[in-house]
Image: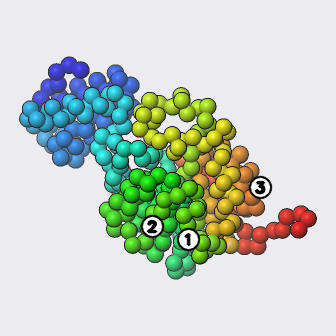
């Protein structure tokens, strides 16, 4: 990288070109966010201070961050935080970085918990595979009466979820537990949940090595690999849903854009009904929802 110029305006311009040449998407945004982090300024304040010179120490720190971003380190990891559904969340190394598309899953869940169910006094949501806690914390922040219990196999992810719950002021209503799938959930909650939500791993095992370098370098493979067909966890979630959901409760899962038919069929085979596919803002299938019937039909031969 050429020797950077020393004003805010010129640094943004030269860095955006440099990062774009390195294949970084949204290069200018990355340059702004990194510079804002070094200077302690919001993006808009950078342009209000566009002629501000950087001190040698600030310039060294900025150049170090830019080089790491060019080498493939995610922006969220460099900043130690990300924005999700209009709120700031802490991030940590080795914990899955949430994607913007997952906001569609949250929106769908909010609709399920409030639309037509507004009379629920103390709704309960369970989340499997919570990662940094953005789904659980956002649902609790948006619905003040909601209680959420979330699980993840990763201890560091669960601890990060607790940090974010405290940061958002929802720790009293969001509990994070370590364990595989639904194993950590208290047994007395069986049949009581209004919602079971998950953004499970759904990449086919054979496709994982071809993911972008920064994904492979910084997202845990366990949060990406959905088995040979990418559907392993949907079978588990659909099979376990009836044990935890109150009759009329909902299962909501994020999916890969090429999986709506398969996931819908898995839900139907598990006795779930009213199956719907919701598209994201790129008009790609992103969420499947399915309802536990009020009366579960008996299987033939019963």
Q: Nearer the viewer, mark 2 or mark 3?
A: 2
Q: Secondary structure at mark 1?
A: loop
Q: Looking at the picture, tell me which residue is in the foreground, 68 or 118.
A: 68
| Image point (19%, 41%), residue name | 38
**Gap between marks 2 and 1 measured at Cα:** 11 Å
Q: Which residue is drawn at the image coordinates 51% and 31% (left, top)?
A: 211
Query: Pointer 3: what residue?
Result: 269
**Quadrant position of the N terminus in the picture:** top left
Is there CB contact under 8 Å for labels 1 and 3?
no
Dot 1 corresponds to which residue? 186
Q: Secondary structure at mark 2?
A: strand
Query: Disc 1 versus disc 3: distance between alpha carbons?
Result: 26 Å
Position in image of residue 47 (x %, y %) = 18, 40
- How many residues crowd mark 1 within 10 Å: few (<14), some (14–19), many (20+)? few
In the rendered structure, the answer to whether residue 67 lies left or right of residue 214 reads left
Q: Are marks 2 and 3 in contact (CB under 8 Å)?
A: no
| Closer to viewer: mark 2 or mark 1 | 1
Spatial distance from mark 2 to mark 3, Cα to Cα? 31 Å
- Residue 163's x, y, as percent? 34, 60
Image: 140 above or below 129 = below
Residue 162, picture quadrant:
bottom left
Helix, strand or loop under label 3 = helix
In the displayed structure, 53 sits above or below 96; it is above
For mark 2, what is the residue?
175
Q: Which quadrant holds the C terminus?
A: bottom right
- In the image, 184 versus 161, the foreground residue is 184
Q: Residue at x 43, y 71 (%)?
A: 173
């Amino acid at each position: 990288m050429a020797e950077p110029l020393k004003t805010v305006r010129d640094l943004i311009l030269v860095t955006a070109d440099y990062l774009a040449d390195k294949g970084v998407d949204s290069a200018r945004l990355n340059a702004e966010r990194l510079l804002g982090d070094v200077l302690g300024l919001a993006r808009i304040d950078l342009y209000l201070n566009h002629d501000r010179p950087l001190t040698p120490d600030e310039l060294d720190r900025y150049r170090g961050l830019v080089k790491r971003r060019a080498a493939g380190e995610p922006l969220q990891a460099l900043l130690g935080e990300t924005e999700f559904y209009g709120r700031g969340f802490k991030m940590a190394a080795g914990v899955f970085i949430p994607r913007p598309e997952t906001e569609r899953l949250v929106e769908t869940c909010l609709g399920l918990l409030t639309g037509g169910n507004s009379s629920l006094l103390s709704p309960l949501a369970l989340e499997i595979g919570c990662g940094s806690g953005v789904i659980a914390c956002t649902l609790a922040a948006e619905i003040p009466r909601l209680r959420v219990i979330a699980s993840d196999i990763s201890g560091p992810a669960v601890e990060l979820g607790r940090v974010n719950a405290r940061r958002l002021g929802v720790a009293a209503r969001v509990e994070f537990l370590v364990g595989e799938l639904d194993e950590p959930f208290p047994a007395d909650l069986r049949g009581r949940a209004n919602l079971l939500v998950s953004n499970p791993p759904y990449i086919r095992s054979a496709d994982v090595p071809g993911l972008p370098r920064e994904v492979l370098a910084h997202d845990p493979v366990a949060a990406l690999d959905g088995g040979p067909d990418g559907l392993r966890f949907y079978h588990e979630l659909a099979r376990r849903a009836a044990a935890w959901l109150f009759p009329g409760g909902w299962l909501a899962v994020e999916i890969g854009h090429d999986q709506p038919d398969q996931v819908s069929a898995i839900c139907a085979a598990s006795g779930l009904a009213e199956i719907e596919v919701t598209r994201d803002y790129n008009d790609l299938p992103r969420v499947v929802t399915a309802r536990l019937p009020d009366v579960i039909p008996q299987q033939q031969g019963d």
